[in-house]
Image (cartoon, helix red, strand yellow):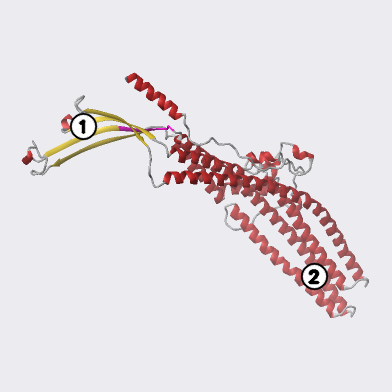
């Protein structure tokens, strides 16, 4: 009978252990386009996101800024600490299978009342009693329903999620620094063009004053020229203000105090490869860190359903203990007289707990559905971001072509208007208009050039580049 009971108990444990609650994770269906854009190269599996950021950006000063940011940026440091926390939680979950063992050593004495039920007046031999105890106890919960394995699955998913979140923070940091740096170069270009135009307007003011003194133009012409000069001069401090604010923003991203950002090149010195390889859209599921983090949150939510379901089923606890106990200290460790041992098993089935367990299971299921929604939303957002960035790159390149032609034409118009004005073949309003229009074209060209660089960086980030 003992053998039958022993083998039956083992078989019960084996069968019960196989009853793992909850469903194993399966990736839900998501909406993704067949390809990005209409170019045949979009069918290629390679992507610019596979390029490390050091190779994607060629400007040495920009790379130095990114290097500094990856070391000192506080958002990234915070995200990296979350990885360490999650790693500790994974280590803790690995110990769920290990029995809990504790030791106990105690010694105490007490005196009963003479007239109490254990007193000498009621038949006790003595009122003074001592007890000396040293023991080792073990408690072990058998993972019948797979609750421990689901907890391990949840902890590992949380760890991987924090890792992906840190990578997502890095991709955003790299792109933000690059876009801020390009914006700074744009402001430099706009300041340079504004100062050049200001020099021209100053020369024109001098010329109109000379012509006014000669009686060839009215004083209205002088006033119009001075107004144009002041309007151009006003742009200089505005742009300088924007430059200083942009420099401080870059220093903040780099984890440094406000100050000047050193730079040597110009906006037109920045070049990217003409390649716009995006790879297959399905690759976003593995390339985009934020999408991976969203999916791992779903894995964690799925494991939590299994944990909540297992909490509703019986829990089997095995206990055992051994030690020494004696009423006299001199006999405390006397073997085998003071030796004792115990063993037991407890099966606990929750019945009524104010509906808490059922509510927890219902909530866990709804939270899993929310995680599915967030995952699908993140995939859809990623696809839209890539598509938008790709369109911006292509259309801004076309805009830059025409903006450059317009700027070149208007610069020539300024020179022609000045020559015509000197030969009394054009009036001062035509010169002022040509100068203002040319300046607007130069500022617009710098803006479009910056927007194209910004779009290329955004395409790189939206494809999942920047964390390698």
Depth order, front residue of 21/453: 21
Between marks 2 and 1, how big is the CA–CA gap?
Answer: 104 Å
Residue at 27 percent of width and 36 percent of height: 104
Q: Quadrant of residue 33?
A: top right
Depth order, front residue of 174/361: 361
- Indicate which label's residue lies in the foreground, 2 or 1: 1
Left or right side of 16 for 101: left
- The residues colored magenta run 137-144
Residue 205, position as x, y percentages in the image: 82, 73
Q: Main secondary structure of the magenta part?
A: strand
Depth order, front residue of 347/421: 347
Residue 303, position as x, y percentages in the image: 50, 39
Depth order, front residue of 113/3: 3
Q: Which residue is mark 2?
A: 202
Mark 2 surroundings: few (<14), some (14-19) or many (≥20) residues within 10 A: some
Residue 139 forms part of the magenta stretch: yes
Q: Which residue is mark 1?
A: 325
Left or right side of 102 for 40: right
Residue 45, position as x, y percentages in the image: 71, 36
Q: Earlier in the sequence, mark 2 or mark 1?
A: 2
């Amino acid at each position: 009978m003992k053998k039958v009971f022993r083998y039956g108990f083992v078989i019960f444990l084996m069968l019960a252990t196989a009853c793992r609650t909850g469903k194993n994770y399966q990736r839900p269906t998501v909406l993704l386009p067949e390809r990005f854009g209409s170019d045949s190269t979009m069918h290629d599996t390679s992507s610019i996101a596979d390029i490390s950021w050091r190779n994607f950006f060629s400007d040495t000063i920009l790379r130095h800024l990114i290097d500094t940011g990856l070391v000192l940026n506080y958002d990234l440091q915070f995200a990296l600490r979350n990885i360490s926390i999650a790693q500790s939680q994974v280590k803790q979950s690995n110990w769920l299978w290990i029995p809990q063992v504790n030791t106990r050593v105690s010694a105490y004495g007490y005196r009963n009342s003479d007239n109490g039920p254990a007193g000498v007046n009621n038949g006790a031999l003595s009122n003074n009693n001592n007890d000396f105890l040293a023991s080792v106890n073990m408690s072990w919960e058998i993972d019948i329903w797979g609750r421990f394995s689901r907890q391990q699955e949840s902890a590992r998913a949380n760890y991987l999620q924090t890792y992906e979140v840190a990578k997502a923070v890095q991709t955003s940091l790299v792109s933000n620094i690059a876009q801020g740096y390009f914006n700074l170069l744009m402001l430099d270009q706009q300041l340079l063009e504004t100062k050049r135009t200001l020099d021209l307007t100053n020369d024109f003011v001098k010329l109109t004053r000379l012509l006014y003194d000669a009686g060839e133009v009215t004083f209205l012409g002088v006033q119009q020229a001075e107004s144009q000069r002041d309007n151009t001069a006003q742009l200089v401090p505005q742009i300088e203000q924007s430059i200083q604010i942009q420099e401080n923003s870059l220093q903040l991203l780099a984890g440094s105090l406000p100050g000047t950002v050193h730079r040597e090149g110009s906006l037109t010195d920045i070049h990217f490869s003409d390649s716009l390889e995006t790879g297959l859209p399905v690759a976003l599921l593995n390339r985009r860190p934020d999408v991976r983090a969203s999916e791992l949150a779903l894995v964690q939510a799925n494991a939590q359903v299994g944990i909540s379901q297992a909490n509703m089923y019986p829990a089997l606890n095995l206990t055992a203990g051994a030690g020494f106990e004696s009423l006299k200290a001199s006999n405390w460790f006397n073997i085998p007289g003071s030796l004792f041992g115990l063993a037991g098993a407890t099966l606990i089935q929750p019945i009524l707990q104010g509906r808490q367990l059922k509510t927890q299971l219902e909530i866990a299921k709804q939270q899993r559905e929310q995680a599915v929604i967030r995952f699908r939303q993140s995939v859809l957002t990623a696809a839209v971001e890539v598509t938008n960035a790709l369109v911006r790159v292509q259309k801004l390149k076309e805009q830059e072509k025409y903006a450059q032609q317009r700027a070149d034409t208007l610069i020539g118009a300024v020179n022609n208007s000045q020559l015509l004005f000197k030969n009394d073949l054009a009036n001062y309003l035509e010169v002022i208009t040509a100068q203002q229009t040319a300046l607007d074209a130069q500022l617009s060209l710098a803006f479009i050039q910056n927007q194209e660089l910004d779009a290329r960086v955004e395409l790189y980030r939206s494809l999942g580049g920047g964390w390698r």
